């Protein structure tokens, strides 16, 4: 069984290789479900890490329905990963109804070649996982990262096993979400070829800050936040008013 470590910083990537992990999924901001890491982080990891590095391409938190501009950003990030010698891309696009956007996901997959392509946990939002899997097989996706459409892979083990059975070797099912030392043998016993986890420990490096930088209102996955033109103009009108 192969172990993929979700590394959200350089320290985690180095530790994954040191501990003997087989592959890294590199991202940033685990609290948001992961977003695309910076160019500097990718480059530094690629210079230090010898095991395969897959990079998450997700331009923002929230949903997986992207604008044309965001789609262009994703392709630019994929090209950077290819230029830096990464082994794979982890990404995917949904339509507004959360069905797979086959057209644009297919474009990302073709743009990614010859790197491997993992469809990420946007899969867990799709209305019908079995239909979604068949669509991804048709698009020549290498693997699906999924918790079995539950809050953890352990809770989603039935769907994961059904997906694996129905896939019949045509695509790899990569269980991920809450996998740890206490439940990992469930997936080994289930015959899965690889698993995904972060193996994260939380250590408090500093005392609670006087002023928090986290803003809870931006953590909701149901929102899309952006700087508003009218609001910006209203502020400018106020500060530029010489009366």
Image (cartoon, grey):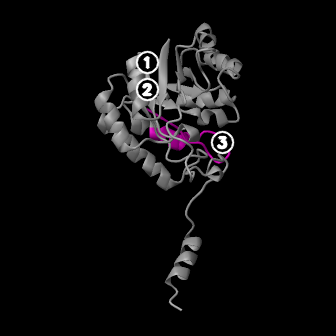
Mark 1, mark 3: which one is toward the viewer? Answer: 1
Rendered position, 156 above or below 212: above
Q: Earlier in the sequence, mark 1 or mark 3?
A: 1
CA distance separating discs 3 and 2: 27 Å
Q: Is residue 17 rendered magenta in the image?
A: no
Q: Residue extending furthest bottom? A: 243
The reply to whether discs 1 and 2 touch (Cβ–Cβ < 8 Å) is yes
Q: Secondary structure at mark 3?
A: loop
Q: Residue at x 64, y 50 (%)?
A: 216
Q: Residue extending furthest top? A: 189
Rendered position, 101 above or below 230: above
Q: Secondary structure at mark 1?
A: loop
Q: Is residue 208 visible?
A: yes
Which residue position holds label 1?
Answer: 21
Which residue position holds label 3?
Answer: 98
**Quarter of the C terminus within the rendering:** bottom right
Which residue position holds label 2?
Answer: 24
Rendered position, 242 above or below 182: below
Q: Is residue 105 rendered magenta in the image?
A: yes
Q: Residue at x 53, y 54 (%)?
A: 67
Q: Is residue 171 visible?
A: no
Residue 116: image x %, image y %?
Answer: 42, 28
Mark 3, mark 2: which one is toward the viewer? Answer: 2
Query: What span is in magenta?
Result: 89-108
The circle on residue 112 is: none
User: In terms of depth relative to the viewer, which is nearer, 208 or 243?
Assistant: 208
Q: Earlier in the sequence, mark 3 or mark 2?
A: 2
Residue 139: image x %, image y %?
Answer: 51, 32
Residue 16: image x %, image y %?
Answer: 42, 22
CA distance separating discs 1 and 3: 33 Å
């Amino acid at each position: 069984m192969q172990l993929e470590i979700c590394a959200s910083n350089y320290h985690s990537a180095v530790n994954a290789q040191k501990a003997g992990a087989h592959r890294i999924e590199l991202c940033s901001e685990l609290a948001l479900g992961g977003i695309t890491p910076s160019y500097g982080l990718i480059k530094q990891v690629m210079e230090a890490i010898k095991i395969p590095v897959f990079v998450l391409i997700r331009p923002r938190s929230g949903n997986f329905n992207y604008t044309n501009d965001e789609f262009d950003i994703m392709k630019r990030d994929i090209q950077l990963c290819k230029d830096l010698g990464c082994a794979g891309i982890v990404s995917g696009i949904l339509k507004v109804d959360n069905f797979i956007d086959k057209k644009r996901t297919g474009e990302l997959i073709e743009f990614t070649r010859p790197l491997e392509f993992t469809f990420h946990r946007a899969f867990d939002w799709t209305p019908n996982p079995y239909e979604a899997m068949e669509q991804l097989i048709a698009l020549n996706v290498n693997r699906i990262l999924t918790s079995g459409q539950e809050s953890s892979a352990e809770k989603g083990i039935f769907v994961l096993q059904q997906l694996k059975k129905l896939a019949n070797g045509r695509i790899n099912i990569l269980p991920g979400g809450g996998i740890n030392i206490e439940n990992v043998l469930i997936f080994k016993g289930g015959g899965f070829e690889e698993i995904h986890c972060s193996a994260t420990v939380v250590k408090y490096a500093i005392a609670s800050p006087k002023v928090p930088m986290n803003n809870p209102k931006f953590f909701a996955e149901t929102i899309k936040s952006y700087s508003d033109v009218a609001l910006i103009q209203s502020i400018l009108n106020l500060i530029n008013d010489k009366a």
